[in-house]
Image: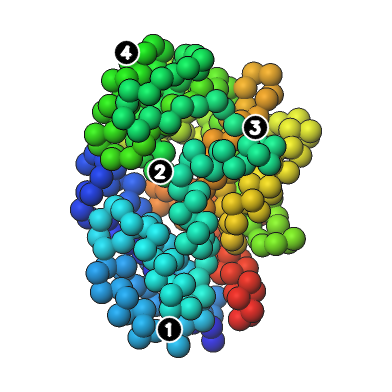
Amino acid sequence: MKKVLVLYNLAERLEKGVQSDLICEQEITIIVPLVVELLVKKGYYVEALKTDLNIWEELKKRRESCDIVFNLAEAFGGGNTNETVIPAMLEGLRMPFTGASLSNMSFTLDKEKTKLVLASYGIPVAPHVLFRTGHEKLNSLGFPLIVKPVREEASIGIYGDCVVDDEAGLRRKILHSLDKYNQPILAEKFIQGREISVGVIGNASNLHVFHPLEFLFEGAKSEREKIRSYEYKWGGKKEQMVKADLPSEIVGRLAEYSKTCFEATDCRDYARMDYRIDQENKIYLLEVNYNPGIGPNSHGLNNTLTKMASFEGCSFEDLVEKIILIAMQRYGVV
């Protein structure tokens, strides 16, 4: 019987951002019991462990008895920061674990560095400027622009007012975001069009790309509201996830781009690439998401990778086990 250790963080303390950012951290209280239950039913011995301040000692106790760690921890120590601490500990203890390595996580957390590297691989990205002080020049970058923190996930820091039409609005939003998130702020050309996501699972030459998923935004009053803002993802507005109806040539190009992104940024086991497609079917990469959310599309939850898997008849339960098996195979412990 293989032994799986499920790691998770429960963010109860705000260390950056705004208080509402903690809302997105609470779904883990629903997901972890479901993951434990389904793995037990599939014949695994399972233990769940919170990544609190005692986690190093707790991991040391289990390092010889654990076959694989299912890393669902998106922060460390009860706050909403320091996600990279967990893979660093697991690598230091030589414990096999699912998903992003320390280097992959640290790199892809930075949206700008990811864009710059992937652009050199031929992946199209929107023009942008990075603001560290709020006083940098825009140069030739025109409006509208979308403003977002450079090292956040899960639509944190992206609100409906992040699409700006003039320099006064831009500077105001950047200064506010710099103050709240204490990190550089990315302003990039707003691509009016469709929001698309593509999931990839596997490793090395054995990568499987899911059919693209499209987000629809119920109640949006303009094209500029049709973004995965915090309001749509966590704040009560309704987004719908559907199988994207796209020309086969676009689907093929998205698959190739996504494989390139996965390999070039050293993703492992599973990842998700987010794109915008403009009205002329030109594709723009938004970001690479390591360890994308894994949860059911039930219990009031919406999980993109799980939805993509469902297009192929793969259930949430089977997807979780598949990711664990993919990681175990990578370590040679299957």
Residue 8 point in image, percent of width and height? 36, 64
Q: Residue at x 45, y 33 (%)?
A: 228
Instruction: Please tell me whether mark 2 sits on a helix, a strand or a loop.
Output: loop
Of the two numbered discs 3 and 4 on the same chain, state the one appearing first in sequence.
Answer: 3
Mark 4–mark 2 Cα distance, whole angstroms, equals 24 Å
Label 1 secondary element? loop
Mark 1 vs 3, N-terminal side: 1
Amino acid type shown at disc 1: Arg
Q: Residue shown at 54%/86% (left/top)?
A: 1
- Please rate how many residues cluster around mark 3, counting C-alpha atoms within 10 Å: few if below 14, some from 14 to 19, many from 20: some
In the rendered structure, which amino acid carries the disc numbered 2? Arg
The answer to whether residue 311 is seen in the rendering is no
Please provide percent x and percent y for residue 19.
22, 41
- Circles 1 and 4 in contact, beta carbons < 8 Å: no
Quick one: label 2, few (<14), some, or many (20+) residues within 10 Å?
A: many
Q: Earlier in the sequence, mark 4 or mark 2?
A: 2
Is 102 situated above or below 301? below
Q: Position of residue 308 (x, y in %)?
A: 61, 47
Dot 1 surroundings within 10 Å: few (below 14), some, or many (20 or more)?
Answer: some
Cα distance, mark 3 to mark 4? 28 Å
**Residue annotated with mark 4:** 168
Mark seen at residue 124: 3
Q: Amino acid at mark 4?
A: Ala
What residue appears at the point 35 percent right and 53 percent down from the top-left corner? 27
Q: CA separation, marks 1 and 2?
A: 31 Å
Image height of 193 relative to 324, above or below: above
Which residue matches tag 1?
63
Image quadrant where residue 145 sits? top left
Q: Nearer the viewer, mark 1 or mark 4?
A: 4
Q: Earlier in the sequence, mark 1 or mark 2?
A: 1
The span from disc 1 to disc 3 (Cα, nearest Å) is 42 Å
